[in-house]
Structure formats: structure tokens, C-alpha cells
Amino acid sequence: MNSIARIETSCDDTGAAVVDEAGCVLGEALHCQKEVHLQSGGIIPVVAQQLHRENIDQVVQEALGASGVSVADLAAVATTVKPGLALSLGVGLQYSRSLVSRHQKPFIPIHHMEAHALTIRLTHHLEFPFLVLLISGGHCLLAVAQGVSDFLLLGQSIDIAPGDMLDKVARRLSLRKHPECHSMAGGKAIEHLAQTGNQELLTFRLPMQQYRNCDFSFSGLQNLVNNAIVQKEKEEGIPEGEILSCVKDVAAAVQHAVAVHIIQRTYRAMLFCIKNSILPSKNATLVVSGGVASNQYIRKVLQNLADANDFALLCPPPRLCTDNGVMIAWNGIERLRAGLGVLHSTAGIRYEPRAPLGIDISKRVEEDSIRVPKLKEIRWLAS
């Protein structure tokens, strides 16, 4: 049975996996850089690059060892080449070139976001087409998956991603000093504190309400939150860097605003796809993946949205929502089966820090000018 090794270095985690054509994960390994980047307050590309270089061979060998499959027995090697941090992508591509050259193996270049979108087909029997919402620290987009390499892009963030925004708000709130959150990543700390906060004590104007499209924006919301934090610090008479007494309420309000913005754009995507017969009017599927998809509050409101519109909601397990080697290996299997993008030479292959997903039809979405009910009209949101 054919097996594929996958290598993932698009951001700050070094991952490798071996997956067979039946979708069985034979071996995997992951080196996480989270603790290093937490100490520095964010990902520093040159640091991420050096850590990838130091760990990539060990991670690949560990995955191969766990699988019991030698490089000689692999059908191909699949590696993320786009999009991502340039310095990180370069490490994975350089290592893969050497590996396939030494062992004369086919090479399958992988689009990171396509891999995220199709991971669900590893864990669930799901036919095309389906709606995909990818929400993470580096990306936020809505697309329709019509095939292994056939995507329609409905909308994407015009500035920063939701995970990035939540991390920045967490840093501004100095959540690493909070006794409950000192070892948590920013987004996870926001989610944790929000569980016991009152989201109604603060309200933030939602982004892009005047635009009837499926694009996202989080930088303006971040500015509103920062201004609110400054005001609260003045009211409490504390300097920046100390913990607000109302920090849990701020976390809850921020999380709610992010969730509602995501819900409104996703709702419009559903309505657009049904109206234009891109998805079936009954029993359609919404797939949600990416690190922010692990946020249970956001997942709950997405479930409510799906239930109210006769969509099934499917999410990969949390370990496959974030960057991992398994999803790249699986995407390689899908491409190997379909005979798509299997190369016998790496000559001419370059990494691409920025790379679009599929065919952009976001202008068509905007031209349809589909109205989405206001929050107070969406009774099921808080149910």
C-alpha cells in the first residue's frame, strides 16, 4: 500500500507524518516552538527558522521510525511550499529537496490552506462540494471545496487574522501575569477567562457592517479593544502592564465580538452558496478548521448557525485543527490518488509566502448584496 511522508514548516511548528492511502496515520512527530515564542511575545521569523533547522531531521526520522516505513518504501514526499513564513518554508523545502534527490522519490508540493480544508476527509467520509471556514493565527477565509485542487474563494481577511488579533489583545492585557494563564497562548487565555466573564459589560462595534460581502477585518476591532483597555486602566488608576479587575469581562466581550463577526460572514456565505446552487439546498456541510476552530465558544455559535440553516458542522479533532504533519501527508495522498501535482523533479519549485486559494469569486458575493440579519434578529445565536 502506498505511503507518503509529509513535512510541514510553514510557521512555527516542525511537523512530519507518514500516512498510507487508506488514511491510516502510520507515524507522526511534532516539535512545537510555542514556549520559545511565548517568551519573546510573538513569532520571530529568524528564530523560527533556526529552530526548524535544528529539529527537522529528528522530527522526520521520528515519524519514519514510528511508521516502520523506510524512505525507500515511500511512494512520494509531500511538503508545504505555500503560504507561510518565508524563512520557515525555505527550511522545509530545502530539506525535502535533499531527501527526494537522495532517494529518487516523487515530490508533491502542498498548499497549506488546501491541506487544512481537506483534513476533514481524513477523519470523515465527506464528498465534494462543501463550505470551508479556515480561522487561525495567520489566516481567515471562506471557500467552497469542489475538488482536491478546486476551490472557490468567497472572502478572506483584508488585514489580520482572528488568532493574531486575540494574541495581541492577550499581550495588551498582560495575561501572562494572570495566575490562571501564565502558561497559555494568548487566544487560549482569552477563551479561558471569558468563561467566567460578562460579555455584556462591554460592547464593540462590529467590523464591515456596511459591506455585504464575505471578507473579514480584525485590525479595527483590535484598535477599539485597545482603546477600551486604556479607558479601563484610567478608571481603575493602574498603569499598562497590570491586570484589570474586569479582565474577564473584557475577554468575554472580545471573544463574543470576534464570534459574531465570523458568524455574520459565514451566514452570508451559506446564503450565497444556496442561492447560486453552489451547494445543495438540503444537507449541505460546513467544515471549520484552523487553530481558532478549537475555541469552544466560537464552535458553539457556529453549531447554532449550522443547525438553523440545515447544514452539518464538521471539525477535525483539535490536534488536526492546528498545523501538523498529518494534514500535509493526507493532502499528498489525495493528490497522488487524483494524479495532481506529482512531480519527478524539484527544479523550479519555489516557496511562496503569499499564495491565493482557488478562484476568487468574492466580487460575485459582493454583487449579490445579500442581507444578513442583525445580531438582535438572530435569536439562536445565544441559545
Image: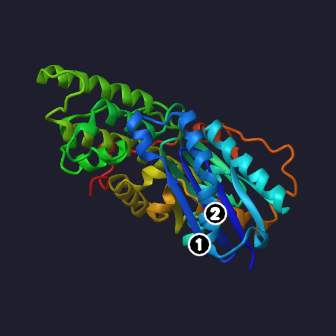
Residue 368 is at least partly visible in this image:
no
Q: Three-letter amino acid code at disc 2?
A: Gln
Residue shown at the point (38%, 30%) measured from the top left: 221
Instruction: State which quadrant residue 187 falls in.
Output: top left
- Return the x and y of residue 51 as percentages of the image width and height: 55, 44
Quarter of the figure with the N terminus: bottom right
- According to the image, label 2 marks what residue? 61
Left or right: 355, with 368 as reference point: right
Q: Secondary structure at mark 1?
A: helix
Q: Secondary structure at mark 2?
A: helix
Circle nearer the N terminus (2, 1): 2
Query: CB of mark 2 within 8 Å of CB of mark 1?
Result: no
Q: Which mark is residue 66?
A: 1
Instruction: State which quadrant residue 363 falls in.
Output: top right
Report the front residue among 290 and 143: 290
Q: How is the image coloured?
A: rainbow
Residue 216 is at least partly visible in this image:
yes
Q: Is residue 169 above or below residue 239?
A: below
Report the front residue among 194 and 382: 194
Q: CA distance from mark 2 to mark 1?
A: 8 Å
Residue shown at the point (34%, 57%) measured from the top left: 296
Q: Three-letter amino acid code at disc 1?
A: Ala
- Return the x and y of residue 13 as percentages of the image width and height: 53, 49
